[in-house]
Image (spheres, helix red, strand yellow):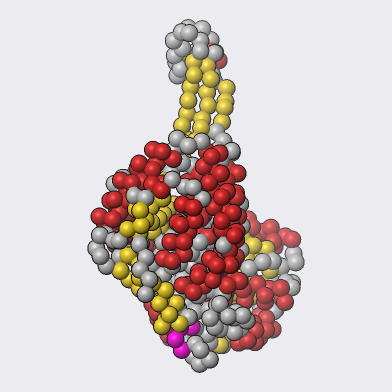
Amino acid sequence: MKTFRNFIAGEWVAPSSGEYFENRNPADTTDVIGRFPLSTAADVDRAVASAKRGFREWSRTPAPARGDVLRRVGDLLSQRKDEIADLMTREMGKPVAETKGDVQEGIDTAYYAASEGRRLFGHTVPSELRDKWAMSFRRPIGVAGIITPFNFPLAIPTWKMFPALLCGNACIFKPAEDVPHTGTVFVEILLEAGLPPEVIQLVHGVGEQEGKAIVDHPEIPLISFTGSTETGRIVGETAGRMHKRLSLEMGGKNAQIVMDDANLELALEGVLWGAFGTTGQRCTATSRLILQKGIHDRFLGMLVDKAKSLKLGDGRKEGTDIGPLVSRNALEKVERYIDIGQSEGNDLLCGGRRATGKGLDKGFFFEPTIFARVEAGQRLEQEEIFGPVLSVSDADEAFRVNNDVKYGLSSSIYTTNVQDAFRAMNELENGITYVNAPTIGAEAHLPFGGVKQTGNGHREGGWEVYEFYSETKVGYVDFSGRLQRAQIDNYLGTPD
């Protein structure tokens, strides 16, 4: 069994604890990928000391030159796309076609970030006084703690780290314990591309220990976290108390609305992909389907037939539609929600059990599951499950039903009515609304994030994220040769 290490202070090193955890293939738990470090707060301390040295060097590197490094990262990811996709599927389960898309998103993000090295714009504005120059510009902040989830093992780390690095910060990276191999390969590529070694630190482990140590550390002023709303609340409390800058990207309970006038075949393709792609393990996954009554029965029949035909299996085998859940804990959580749905009187139309036979017994496979007659306010309609479970309801007031949850990440409407389409974009309480497309499918050059308990207002992706990873500095240059008293009653530069 291969033993992997942390990357701290420019070296691949064992954890101070001497302890490790096993990483196994969720499609076949007899397949052990390797042992990875169970780090401690002492490892985080060493990483912080090194990252501070790296920050001093990197922050003085011109931003276009920082962008050149990220461009080389994009080139290396392109060259190794198939290899990385294969290893990613092996450790988290989703089909190779999806993990190739994951890598491609990292490539897109690298090239976009590289170009931002020449566009870290500030503003030059007129001064209210004579012979005085006024401007703003962007400066890096320091050491960024990067804590990422399992479902996009490469894409989400690139969303966070490329903007952080481009802005001149150093990073301490803790990948999810379910996908440490992808995290390790990603750091190797950063180093190969020419990133100074002390600018990036890789600390493996579990969230309750290493993630907490990063959040708690007084010399990490910047935290970016993607995970559950419950954990995000704890991170937010700590960051608030310690005055850290914090970006939270958390849960979702996303609905696809299908109107009576919709193209039903298109809507069917959308909900199948949105609900069961990545085995439902996306924060943007379609976990609710709201059908107008005119098409309800017909569409539901079409959906159940198609869901039953989806093929489960190892994501590295051709023809697989749905891979395993990422872990036993994830599988057992889905099973608990099946019990909840049945206890609340919802109609189980298909699925609802572990998938077995035909090579599935060694993995965490679960059948695509559809519940009907799910009413507003019930737990299946309100709570994030993070698995292949879709709740279906009919509603005369679909927009109200969409908005009546604590989350607000993504939404979707299928309609041929332009008025309904634009009403949806205006009235659905989500950070993202798709028209005639599923709730999943963000693009790297646009902001990503949600409202309510989905996040804390910051966005990842696009141009807005660069503001999160940098500070605004204002500079004034007075070349008048005399004291000019601003904020005194001398408006328009009237002489004293």
**Percent x, y for residue 387?**
49, 76
Relative to the observer, which residue lies in front, 397 or 115? 115
**257 up-or-down from 57: above or below:** below
The answer to whether residue 422 is left or right of residue 405 is: right
Magenta-drawn stretch contains 363: yes
Relative to the observer, which residue lies in front, 422 or 34? 34
Farthest residue in the bottom direction?
357
**Percent x, y for residue 224?**
42, 53
Examine the image and state in which quarter residue 178 appears. Answer: bottom left
Who's the residue at 44% across and 40% down the image?
58
Q: Which residues are magenta?
A: 361-365
Examine the image and state in which quarter residue 108 appears. Answer: bottom right
Who's the residue at 52% across and 85% down the image?
367
Who's the residue at 45% across and 78% down the image?
26
**Percent x, y for residue 75?**
59, 54
Who's the residue at 24% across and 63% down the image?
17
Main SS of residues in magenta? loop
